[in-house]
Image (tube, rainbow, N blue to C red):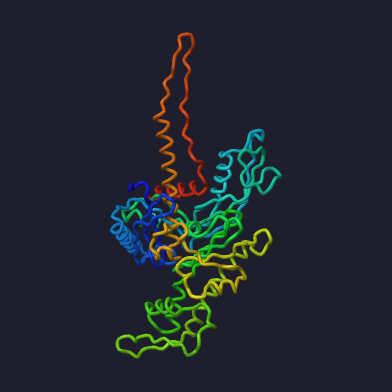
Amino acid sequence: MENNKIAVGLDIGTTKIVAMIGRKNEYGKIEVVGIGKAKSLGVKRGVVSNITQTIQSIQQAVDEAESVSGLRIEEVVVGIAGQHIRSLHHSDYITRNNAEDVINDTDIDHLVNQVHKLVMLPGEEIIHVLPQEYKVDSQADIKEPIGMYGGRLEANFHVVVGQVSSIRNIGRCVKSAGLGLRDITLEPLASASAVLSQEEKEAGVALIDIGGGTTDLAIFKDGIIRHTAVIPFGGNVITDDIKEGCSIIEKQAELLKIKFGSAWPGENKDTEIVSIPGLRGREPKEITLKNLSKIIHARVQEIIEHVYLEIKNYGHETSKGKLIAGIVLTGGGSQLKHLRQLVEYITGMDARIGYPNEHLAGDSDEVLSSPAYATAVGLLMVGLDKSSKVEEIKEVAAEVKTTDIEPTLEVEQEPVIQEKPKPKIKKKSFFDKFTEGLKDFLDNAE
């Protein structure tokens, strides 16, 4: 088993940190060879609040994954999220010097770099610029303008912005834990690659990833990401409400939510009661399941309404922006009983729970197909895709090296110089350029 064909996804969440080691089998499915999990102590709402505790949690998760797999982890693919992430829409254009030349990569890069120069709020940095549709002269709705003639190139952009300090802190935690940064990707994009099909992305779909501290939203339409948002509420606020409403400790509130919690209060009878042990010899507390589900319902409804407002702001109610594939729920919070029915009731859209098992090998542990591991599986997929691209480039370069051409000289003719064929290197996608730029930014920040 060669180490260069293995990738590691590191999901730094609010409630847990997961390190997942995997490789692709002969069928192209992901075979997870090791997984480590640690309680996340230094992260609040997706943002590092305690560097030392976060480093310790990362090391604990990595050590566990190493001991299970018997492999040494050197580089990881990390996800970034948190309440500091926001997105905006922007239109920009360039006027080309020569309209007789066809539009090429340089023109697109020029346009994207121009957007990167936008003035942001103090402490904010543009981390992602994604072109949506292009317009060449008066012709609109162009997906791929390369190779076309035109004097004016215009595009609508989806711009993702984040706090410089928050991104830098995650990079520092990973490096201080003795790990290299192989790649960085937005967590909603990683979750989307793990649980969404290409057909759903084309038809129009909203991915809602309900984590411990935040709820991430990613909207796709026509195969392109159209909108991202991070709502600063997640499963932890539901636990806090149960703790306050029932006057119990956090550990008991979390267990109550997982075992007996429901987002739909109508199904529980008043006679259904759970007894909670009292602290240090105190009398046990009796809680009705109807009251428990009322507390959960109120908070979940608030989270869904926040998300639905973002979906409406994107333009779901317009005929052009309609999301035909509806909503896909993932993340640990999506496992709450009757959540899917409540989402359908509030939004009027079809909903399903997103499991990452479609990309996993058939003999994978059943635990890995839980929605709670969707982001970790997605980050692992990003890492494996990067590895396969690097392998392709290396193979092509090796072929070129071995096929040295010996020039044959004839007496009456001048020597014919034959050029070596250039290796075909795959054109970088906008995601590749974004992650490379972010890695450079983190390296320079050290």
Residue lying at 39% horizontally and 49% vertically, measured from the top left = 182
* Residue extending farthest top: 412
Give the total of numbered labels.
Answer: 0
Residue 15, placed above or below residue 157: below
Residue 265, placed above or below residue 117: below
Left or right side of 180 for 91: right
- The percent coordinates of residue 122 (x first, y second) are 50, 57
Residue lying at 62% horizontally and 38% vertically, measured from the top left = 147
Task: Decide which of 113, 279 is in the foreground and name it.
Answer: 279
Residue 114, placed above or below residue 257: above
Task: Decide which of 245, 293 is in the foreground and name it.
Answer: 293
- The percent coordinates of residue 44 (x first, y second) are 42, 67
Corner quadrant of residue 252: bottom left
Residue 182, placed above or below residue 265: above
Q: Is residue 375 visible?
A: yes
- The percent coordinates of residue 64 (x first, y second) are 30, 61
Residue lying at 40% horizontally and 61% vertically, measured from the top left = 12
- The percent coordinates of residue 98 (x first, y second) are 65, 34
Q: Is residue 123 visible?
A: no
